Amino acid sequence: MSMLLKICGMKHNIAEVAKLQPDYLGFIFYDQSPRYFDGVIPKISPEIRKVGVFVNASIAFVLSKISDYGLKAVQLHGDEDLIYCHELRKALLKQWPDVEIWKVFRIGAKFDFRIVQPFEKTVDRFLFDTLSAVHGGSGKKFDWTLLRDYEAGVPVILSGGIGPRDVNDLQKLDESGVSVFAVDVNSKFELEPGHKDISVLKNFKDELQR
């Protein structure tokens, strides 16, 4: 099992989390979130890629945060359509051609994966999260077996309620033939919103990579 690790909702103990050397750290630039970030990111390893999470933000706002924080990926967690993704890609190619676009889709009791097909040539990753009334952060899982119906070639990031005891289930998912590029963890590894539990994260990362 080879899955990268993204730790999202960073706010308080960023330097401590960065010492664990996750592949990605996520910063939420959505002011309705309790993990909304508007602070200073301490100096961290350049090998850790910073991801900005946005919800229906203007492209100008997204570009400003890429400039301010050196983001390597933009995670679109709202209702951004294909036209928006095309326009964002055009803007990125002018200034930051290496910055990735991740498009989030929220999955409920069922999901028609044909919805994602128009985005295949425009975005770099699909992130599948649990359908909820809010934009992420529900702490709940969707039925991962639905991913067996996913046939596109865009790498998948799995999100939504992943907790410290889920490594075995991730292993089973991998063995079932579902290819997951990375897992995205957040609320199940917190002492409070934006403050991560270092020891629990370390154990999870060790197990994930074992």
Image: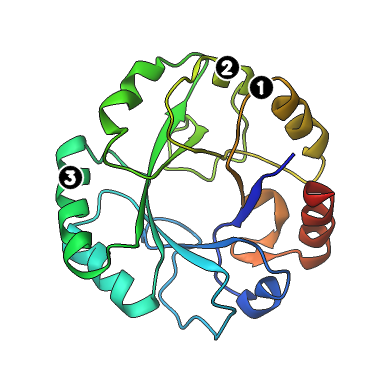
What number is the disc on residue 86? 3
What number is the disc on residue 27? none
Q: Position of residue 10 (x, y in %)?
A: 56, 66
Residue 163 left/right relative to 101: right
* 2 and 1 marks in contact (CB < 8 Å): yes
* 3 and 2 marks in contact (CB < 8 Å): no
Residue 10 left/right relative to 16: left
What number is the disc on residue 177? 1
Q: Where 47 falls versus 139 (above or below)?
A: below
Mark toward the start of the polypeptide (3 vs 2): 3
Residue 53 left/right relative to 181: left
Q: Where 129 falls versus 35 (above or below)?
A: above
- Quadrant (top left, top right, bottom left, bottom right) of the N terminus: top right
Q: What amino acid is found at the position of numbered circle 3 in the picture?
A: His
Q: What amino acid is found at the position of numbered circle 1 in the picture?
A: Gly
Mark toward the start of the polypeptide (3 vs 1): 3
The CA span between labels 2 and 1 is 8 Å
Q: Badge 3: how crowded within 10 Å, few (<14), some, or many (20+)? A: some
Q: Position of residue 195 (x, y in %)?
A: 65, 67
* Color style of the picture: rainbow
